[in-house]
Amino acid sequence: MILSFWLIVPFLTNTYTFFYRSSVTDVTQQDLATTKSCLQQFRDNVKSEQDIRTKQDLWSERWRCYS
């Protein structure tokens, strides 16, 4: 019984950690790409005021479900 516990618990913990790290990595890379794009557009003065408002509305809707 102890042996089965000793084998199962670390397996579950390691599996969770693996998928969590993978998820965090994907989100972080996407965030960095978005930030880089926004900063480049800001530097080049490409975005219009309406585009910025649209993007802000989309982000506020997306993050509203987390608050």
Image (spheres, grey):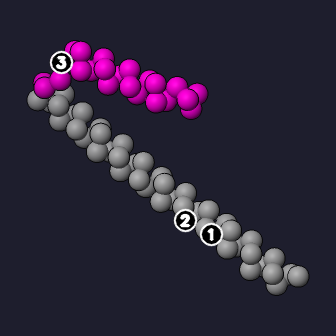
Residue labelled with disc 1 = 14
Using a 10 Å C-alpha cutoff, classify the residue at mark 3 as few (fewer than 14 neighbours), some (14 to 19) or many (20 or more): few
Q: Residue at x 70, y 73 (%)?
A: 10
Vertical arrangement, residue 19 with respect to residue 42, above or below? below
The C terminus sits in image quarter: top right
Disc number for residue 48: 3
Residue labelled with disc 2 = 18
Question: The magenta stretch spans which residues?
Answer: 45-67
Q: Quadrant of residue 54?
A: top left
Q: Residue at x 40, y 27 (%)?
A: 59
Is tag 1's residue or tag 3's residue first in the polypeptide sequence? 1
Q: Main secondary structure of the magenta part?
A: helix
Marks 2 and 1, how far apart at CA = 6 Å
Quick check: is 50 in the magenta stretch? yes
The N terminus sits in image quarter: bottom right
> What's under tag 3, amino acid-wise?
Ser
Residue 19 position within the rendered picture, expressed as x and y whole percent measured from the top left:
54, 61
> Dots 2 and 1: beta carbons under 8 Å?
yes
Vertical arrangement, residue 5 with respect to residue 55, above or below? below
> What's under tag 1, amino acid-wise?
Asn
